[in-house]
Image: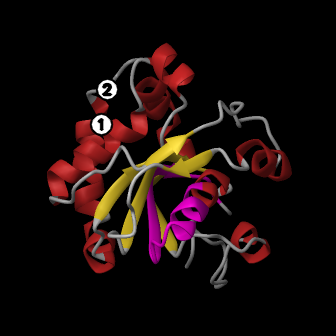
Amino acid sequence: MKCGKKLADDAQLCSDCASVSHMYNRGRSLYEYASAALSIYKFKYGGRREYADYYGEQIAEYLGDFIRKVKPDALIPIPLHRKRLNKRGYNQAEELAKAIGKYTGIPMENKLLKRVRNTTAMKQLSPGERRANLKNAFIISGNSVKLRTIIIIDDIYTTGTTLDEAARAFHEAGVGDIYFITLAGGSSV
């Protein structure tokens, strides 16, 4: 009911969401990570920016009801630190947000959320290490008070730490309802 992970039984929350108070209202992922890992790896690290259009179309089709129900004012991509952006050449979350916006008509705002710390890659970090790694990594650099409802866009949802830290910054800036969409999420089963 919170992060959108599939559950093995009739529980409403996965074990992660049951043990952590997330800063976002709710979110959804298009794929389970295991089924899309290679494609996402190519999109993220292999320069396959063109994948974003297909992903955006699929998100609009399969998560469109969720998006329409939320009625967001804007799509907000998780930013990369400038050093990582320079190395990679593009921000995969921004490419994805552009594509989702193309198919849904929702504007993307890529200047509001800034990553001010060059955080460590989180693949091998524990949940506690992830929280410490991302603490104070994001700031709001624009007037977000006009935004009442946003959807944060990222590529992968694991524990929700990145989304929580971004959502925390937006809550402090006055945004009321914060949702997320990712390409893939981990499994709780």
Do residues under tags 2 and 1 come within 8 Å of each other at their CB atoms? yes
Seen from the viewer's position, the closer of residues 136 and 105 is: 136
On screen, 16 above or below 136?
Answer: below
Residue 116: x and y in percent read: 60, 37
Q: In which quadrant will I find the N terminus?
A: bottom right
Q: Can I make out residue 37 in this image?
A: yes
Q: In which quadrant will I find the C terminus?
A: bottom right
For the point 38% across and 66% down, the residue is: 150
Classed neighbour count for the residue bearing mark 1: other residues with Cα under 10 Å, few (<14), some (14–19), many (≥20): many
For the point 48% across and 23% down, the residue is: 85
Residue 62: x and y in percent read: 29, 62
Going by the image, does 169 lie left or right of 17? left
User: Mark 2: which amino acid?
Assistant: Arg
Q: CA distance from mark 2 to mark 1?
A: 6 Å
On screen, 156 above or below 28?
Answer: above
For the point 79% across and 73% down, the residue is: 19
For the point 74% across and 77% down, the residue is: 18
Seen from the viewer's position, the closer of residues 15 and 6 is: 15
Per the image, the residue denoted by label 2 is: 49
User: Which residue lies most toward the top here?
Assistant: 87
Asked whether residue 179 is drawn in magenta, I would say yes
Name the disc covering residue 52, or none: 1
Label 2 secondary element: loop
User: Mark 1: which amino acid?
Assistant: Ala
Going by the image, does 134 lie left or right of 171? right
On screen, 182 above or below 50?
Answer: below
Bounds of the magenta span?
Answer: 166-187
Classed neighbour count for the residue bearing mark 2: other residues with Cα under 10 Å, few (<14), some (14–19), many (≥20): some
On screen, 102 above or below 5?
Answer: above
Asked whether residue 167 is drawn in magenta, I would say yes
Look at the image and name its color scheme: secondary structure
Residue 121: x and y in percent read: 68, 31
